[in-house]
Amino acid sequence: MTTALLRTADELHARVRHGRRAVVMTMGALHEGHATLIRAARQIAGGDGEVVVTVFVNPLQFGAGEDLDRYPRTLEADVKIAEQAGADAVFAPSVEEVYPGGEPQVRITAGPMGERLEGASRPGHFDGMLTVVAKLLHLTRPDVALYGQKDAQQLALIRRMVRDLNFGVDIVAVPTVREDDGLALSSRNRYLSPQERRTALALSRALFAGCDRHAAQEALR
């Protein structure tokens, strides 16, 4: 199977659809975590369905001083990974294709859920994320969309948006894929120095320790 590379929504809409369409949304720089999502999408879509992977670095969710300009862009390698994982098409639109009139004046607002946790230190991030997810759902018209549990707040907000605004799509969560040392796979891990990587591991170790402690307490009951 050869994975098609599509640049416009018209190209995507011109494809003849059979069965369910499953979509995996990414900002590119694909790794094994994304491949796991694509394989899960392939299982859901089945042999008769279609798996579409979106690759779009969304400027709306980057704040001042963040890494929009240096965010890794590796489209050729991304298409190969998507193909190996079972994708039928990669939809990689330009900024002009997604936002034809420039930055949209009407946007999705995350509300109180987007002001906590990560949103507290990245104001506006989740508004930008939900706006592009809403647009990509409309552009790709899927039956089901898959997201990783690694971005837990993002996943919760997407589920809430789909419920509150009556999107006709099923949202499926896929477990986090981790490296051998326990660090969650992320396109931004390449930014970490060895010391920063060791520091980053504190979070997953704390989570696993808390999970083990809870399981032990439940067993004692």
Image (spheres, grey):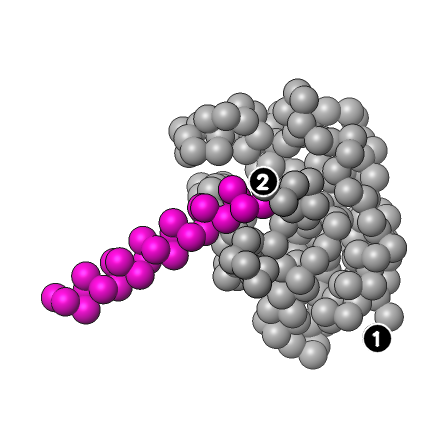
> At numbered mark 2, what does the secondary structure look like: helix, strand or loop?
helix
In reply to whether residue 211 is colored magenta, the answer given is: yes
Q: Earlier in the sequence, mark 2 or mark 1?
A: 1
Q: Quadrant of residue 49?
A: bottom right
Q: Quadrant of residue 82?
A: bottom right
Determine the secondary structure under disc 1: loop
Name which quarter of the figure residue 185 lies in: bottom right
Residue at the location (49% across, 30% down)? 119
| Viewer-closest of 216 and 164 | 216
Please tell me how crowded label 1 is: few (under 14), some (14-19), or many (20+) other residues with Cα within 10 Å: few
Which mark is on residue 1? 1
| Coordinates of residue 134 in the picture (x, y in percent) | 61, 41
Q: Residue at x 79, y 56 (%)?
A: 78
Residue numbers of the magenta segment: 197-221
Q: Is residue 82 found left or right of 137 in the rendered image?
A: right
The residue that mark 2 highlights is 196
Counting from the top left corner in percent of width and height, residue 10 is at: 84, 49
